């Protein structure tokens, strides 16, 4: 077409006289214009697509695509029964861009009301010369709704996750807590942070003009980013029992702190780990002292609870038998310039009674006969001086000095639990050796994910372990120091501990650690319970301070497990010392609970009123001929308390000291009321 | 013979008209289909995003309700309720184990 056009033009020039064909000229010009424009467009397209293509593509990507950072929700923590102990949920936080606020002065009261915050705090935040200010982190849904309803410009909500512990302070120190950004900072949360924390991933999302993000393809987003769950061996119910009993013990005896441990004997699984004062991980900004897991971090001198280990070692070595007698020096013995005392002076005692009455002097003598190297070897075999290997951080291994550095007085001290230190878990592990027929099993705190298990080791012969267990039964069931740990109908076993605390100057002062290590049932142990109260006063004996707490935990745990017998031990007919825990085959002739029948099918449980003669269970010493108030003046307080407990009475104690100098009601008088109350006044000596 | 093997150019161009038109039409249809599919894909992405947001909201709510439920069933709270209703734990001798 252009050829013809040009040839036409040539002909026009040749035919000078012919009139010009303006139509054709216009068409040519138009064609040229179209050609130029078309060519320009093609050039531009070439420039945009080919020359600047990669650069513009990158710009477009930046505009339309955005990197979306995703993090999976943190895993949950459960107890052994599947009860939820910790869970993360989405929650809103509020931030402000102060420069975008139209009227900060007017916005402040609205925000303060919406967030239930002090207005001064809001004003301070709004006045900060920054483009981004957190106003409140992790607010409630109601407050978030208030913010949305307020509709303020420059105020935004951001989605975050928060960790919740629905049982409050229950096992707070064990669970630990997480920081604002979801990282584990203490306890299980920290030890299992890698497992619990969700995975991270970055995806490319499409962004529309209004900034909304969406995915046009899967990009592998079907991957599960959630963190793994952790299941503990703890039982929330038993943990609750332990915490309640521990709190009561610490409060009643004005203790500084306390700890309680419950372990399932045959499996070594920890059922409860309680610390007092409590720590609520929902409010982690508390005194750091409160979130200390003392069971793990505090290594204390165990006191007389260690005597069980001494007995086992001496029996294993054939040094003593159950009947081997030692002279207890009537309560006072001087060894290389140091005086060792017993609470009550005694003469010759067989081995079982040494443990039953917790004689320091006789224990020291057994320790000296055993020798430092042998005794140290057994303590080491039972795991003292080394960590238990539980998956918690910062365990204190305690102090067990090498035997070559032990002088005789050191050996004597270690024999009754002073001069070395151990944490509560180490004590539990050692006691489990006795209950598990001489075999040491590792403790366990985590069921899932499965933890590596240390191999079992034989420490004592089976008969040795059983002999010590029988001795421990006597401590509770006979007239030992642990009678307050008795549970009617269940054989108990255990050992009291009253350790003196060393002062900063390295000497022993007047502060004590009271403890009790107990087993229920004592003949076929299922639960090991260990309670420690730090610095109780005025009472400081383990048998008075800690044993009742152990009893309470044992009683409730057995009832919870359906293992509390229904036999008639409460009636305890004719048993003077006969609590014995022995399970007779006799069905309850139930005095405290009677069943009436109204009509045909309606059994009504009736608790007799106090006026009825058999309303109260008869315990030791309440036989018909012994209805007089006993005389406990002049006795040591421990002896007095134990004696009165035989009458079913828990006395009130007034004043400081160790000897009872006055009592109310007066001795040898008939009990004034059905509810027996005794007050004892103490003096120093 | 050789002259017969070559069709006149007019005939050749006619022979290609319909396939070309068909090809062009198909191209147009396919182009429209691509545009339509892309629009649908975008709509679907919007809907999916909305559903995902809704799902996350419900999962969050479910998690909060679970936490609340566990809190209501916690031993300490039940203990308080028990005390309010004058219930207390069974003592030894007050327990009967019923066997079928």
Image: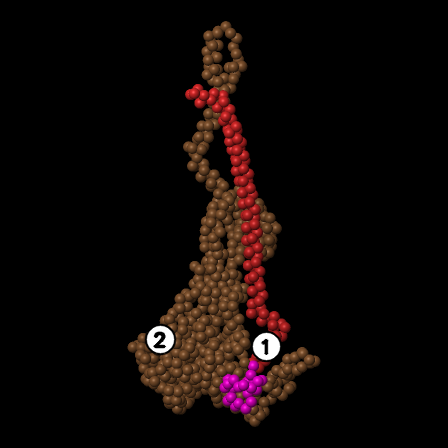
**Measured from the top left, where is residue A537 in percent x and y?**
48, 78
A68 shown above or below A37 = below
Which residue lies at the image location 47% right of the left edge and 67% below the top edge?
A232
**Measured from the top left, where is residue A361 in percent x and y?**
38, 85
> Which color is chain A depicted in?
brown
A76 shown above or below A274 = above
A619 shown above or below A517 = below
Which residue lies at the image location 38% right of the left edge and 69% below the top edge?
A454
- In the rendered image, the quadrant that contains the C terminus of chain A is bottom left
**Measured from the top left, where is residue A461 in percent x and y?**
37, 80
Q: Is A641 covered by the magenta stretch?
A: no
Of A496 and A475, which appears nearest the observer? A475
Q: Foreground mark, 1 or 2?
A: 1
> Which color is chain B depicted in?
red
Instruction: Name the residue carrying label 1.
Output: B100
Please identify the residue farthest to the right as the structure is shown: A599
**Colouring of the image:** by chain
Q: Is residue A235 visible?
A: yes
Q: Which mark is residue A381?
A: 2
Chain letter for mark 2? A
Q: Are marks 1 and 2 on the same chain?
A: no
Which span is picked out in magenta? A566-588
Which residue lies at the image location 40% right of the left edge and 73% below the top edge?
A441
Q: Is residue A251 left or right of residue A439?
A: right
Q: Is A579 covered by the magenta stretch?
A: yes
Of A523 and A427, which appears nearest the observer? A523
Q: Which mark is residue A199?
A: none
Which residue lies at the image location 44% right of the left edge and 23% below the top edge?
B5
Bin the neighbour count of mark 2 within 10 Å (Cα to Cα): few under 14, some 14-19, many 20 and up: some
């Amino acid at each position: 077409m252009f050829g013809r056009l040009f040839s036409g033009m040539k002909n026009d020039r040749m035919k000078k006289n012919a009139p010009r064909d303006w139509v054709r000229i216009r068409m040519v010009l138009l064609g040229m214009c179209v050609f130029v424009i078309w060519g320009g467009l093609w050039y531009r397209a070439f420039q945009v697509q080919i020359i600047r293509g990669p650069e513009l593509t990158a710009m477009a990507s930046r505009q339309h695509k955005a990197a979306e950072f995703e993090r999976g929700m943190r895993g949950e923590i459960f107890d052994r029964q599947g009860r939820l102990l910790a869970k993360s949920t989405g929650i809103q936080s509020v931030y402000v861009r102060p420069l975008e606020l139209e009227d900060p002065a007017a916005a402040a009261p609205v925000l303060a009301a919406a967030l239930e915050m002090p207005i001064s705090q809001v004003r301070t935040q709004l006045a900060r010369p920054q483009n981004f200010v957190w106003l409140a982190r992790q607010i409630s849904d109601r407050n978030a709704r208030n913010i949305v309803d307020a509709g303020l410009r420059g105020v935004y909500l951001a989605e975050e996750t928060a960790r919740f512990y629905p049982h409050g302070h229950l096992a707070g120190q064990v669970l630990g807590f997480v920081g604002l950004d979801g990282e584990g900072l203490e306890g299980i949360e920290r030890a299992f942070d890698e497992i619990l924390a969700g995975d991270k991933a970055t995806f490319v999302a499409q962004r529309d003009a209004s900034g909304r993000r969406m995915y046009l393809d899967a990009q592998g987003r079907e991957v599960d980013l959630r963190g793994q769950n952790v299941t503990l061996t703890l039982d929330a119910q038993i943990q609750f029992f332990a915490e309640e009993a521990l709190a009561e013990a610490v409060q009643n005896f004005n203790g500084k702190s306390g700890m309680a441990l419950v372990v399932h004997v045959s499996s070594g699984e920890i059922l409860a780990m309680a610390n007092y004062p409590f720590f609520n991980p929902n409010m982690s900004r508390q005194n750091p002292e409160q979130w200390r897991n003392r069971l793990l971090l505090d290594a204390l001198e165990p006191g007389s609870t260690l005597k069980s280990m001494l007995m086992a070692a001496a029996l294993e070595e054939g040094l003593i038998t159950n009947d081997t007698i030692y002279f207890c020096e009537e309560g006072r013995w001087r060894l290389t310039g140091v005086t060792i005392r017993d609470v009550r002076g005694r003469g010759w005692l067989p081995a079982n009674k040494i443990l039953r009455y917790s004689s320091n002097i006789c224990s020291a003598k057994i320790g000296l006969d055993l020798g430092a190297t042998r005794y140290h070897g057994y303590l080491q075999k039972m795991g003292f001086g080394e960590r238990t290997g539980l998956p918690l951080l910062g365990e204190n291994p305690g102090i067990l000095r090498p035997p070559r550095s032990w002088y005789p007085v050191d050996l004597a001290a270690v024999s009754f639990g002073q001069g070395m230190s151990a944490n509560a878990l180490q004590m539990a592990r050692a006691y489990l050796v006795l209950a598990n027929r001489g075999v040491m099993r590792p403790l366990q705190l985590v069921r899932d994910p499965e933890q590596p298990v240390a191999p079992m080791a034989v420490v004592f012969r089976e008969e040795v372990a059983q002999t010590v267990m029988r001795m421990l039964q006597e401590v509770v069931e006979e007239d030992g120091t642990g009678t307050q740990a008795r549970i009617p109908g269940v054989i108990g076993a255990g050992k009291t501990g009253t350790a003196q605390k060393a002062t900063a100057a390295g000497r022993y002062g007047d502060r004590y650690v009271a403890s009790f290590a107990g087993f229920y049932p004592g003949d076929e142990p299922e639960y090991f319970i260990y309670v420690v109260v730090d610095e109780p006063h005025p009472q400081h004996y383990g048998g008075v301070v800690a044993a009742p707490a152990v009893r309470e935990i044992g009683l409730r745990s057995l009832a919870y497990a359906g293992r509390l017998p229904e036999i008639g031990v409460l009636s305890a007919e004719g048993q003077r010392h006969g609590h014995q825990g022995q399970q007779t085959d006799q069905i309850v002739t139930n005095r405290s609970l009677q069943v009436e029948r109204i009509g045909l099918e309606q059994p009504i449980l009736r608790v007799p009123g106090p006026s009825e003669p058999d309303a109260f269970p008869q315990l030791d010493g309440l036989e018909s001929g012994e209805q007089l108030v006993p005389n406990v003046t002049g006795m040591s307080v421990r002896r007095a308390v134990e004696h009165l407990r035989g009458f079913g009475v828990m006395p009130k104690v007034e004043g400081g000291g160790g000897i009872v100098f006055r009592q109310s009601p007066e001795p040898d008088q008939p009990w004034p009321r059905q509810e027996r109350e005794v007050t004892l006044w103490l003096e120093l000596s | 013979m050789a002259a017969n093997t070559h069709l006149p150019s007019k005939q050749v161009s006619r022979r290609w008209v319909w396939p070309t038109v068909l090809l062009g039409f198909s191209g147009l249809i396919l182009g429209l289909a691509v545009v339509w599919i892309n629009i649908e894909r975008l709509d679907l992405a919007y809907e999916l995003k909305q559903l995902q947001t809704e799902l996350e909201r419900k999962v969050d709510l479910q998690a909060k309700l679970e936490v609340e439920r566990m809190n209501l069933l916690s031993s300490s709270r039940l203990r308080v309720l028990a005390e309010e209703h004058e219930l207390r734990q069974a003592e030894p001798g007050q327990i009967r184990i019923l066997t079928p």
